[in-house]
Image (cartoon, grey):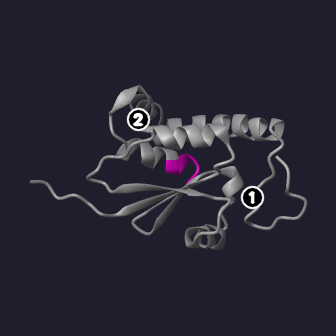
Amino acid sequence: MGFMSTQQLLLVYDEQCPACSHYTKLLQVKATVGELVLINARDPHPVLEEITEAGLDIDQGMVLKMDDTLYYGADAIHVLSLIGTSSGLFNRLNHWAFRSQTRARFIYPILKSGRNLLLRMLGRRKINNLNIENNERF
């Protein structure tokens, strides 16, 4: 019988972003890695304080906390692709697209630009966890 990890993997994302919400709901990680816990970046949570202290702008990338390490943006997507299951077409495509760190760093900014455009069109406000002046709109 194999050892099952009880580690929690915290994935912090903007729940008001339809693309981000869809991505996180389809994503599955291997049970041996741990339990994926989805955290809405718009709700207070201790991990958000860590993200802000690290100087990471949550409006510019999701964050995965795993083994006390924060993975941001393209690095988060890359790690998620490596620990993801091969269950279903979405997870297989995610693994193929982002298992290469080079490919993840190329594709992620394109996806982020599309996300920002979508949120601008929907009239969403930025989370602005770094409290940057005049940084409320996408």
As drawn, the label of residue 95 is 2
Residue that protrudes farthest toward the top in the picture: 89
How would you classify the magenta stretch by its main secondary structure?
helix
Q: How many marks?
A: 2
Q: Circle 1 is placed at which residue position?
A: 127
In the rendering, at what x and y percent does residue 49 appear? 62, 73
Q: Is residue 28 above or below residue 14?
A: above
Return the residue nearer the eye: 72 or 128.
128
Which residue is pictured at 85% across the width and 57% down the height? 135
Which element carries disc 1, helix, strand or loop? loop
Answer above or below: position of 75 versus 90. below
- Image spot of residue 19 (x, y percent): 63, 37
Seen in the picture, residue 49 relative to 27 is either above or below; the reply is below
The residue shown at (41%, 33%) is 91
The amino acid type of the residue labelled 1 equals: Ile
Q: Which residues are magenta?
A: 72-76
Q: Sort mark 1 into few (<14), some (14-19) or many (20+) by Cα contacts within 10 Å.
A: some
Q: Is residue 129 left or right of residue 111?
A: right
**Quadrant of the image for the N terminus?**
bottom left
Query: Is 63 part of what is drawn in magenta?
Result: no
Assess whether mark 2 and mark 1 are in contact (beta carbons under 8 angstroms): no
Q: Secondary structure at mark 2?
A: helix
The quadrant where residue 133 appears: bottom right
What's the CA distance linking mark 1 and mark 2?
A: 29 Å
Q: How far across and how far down the image is residue 117, in percent?
A: 78, 36
Q: Amino acid under label 2?
A: His
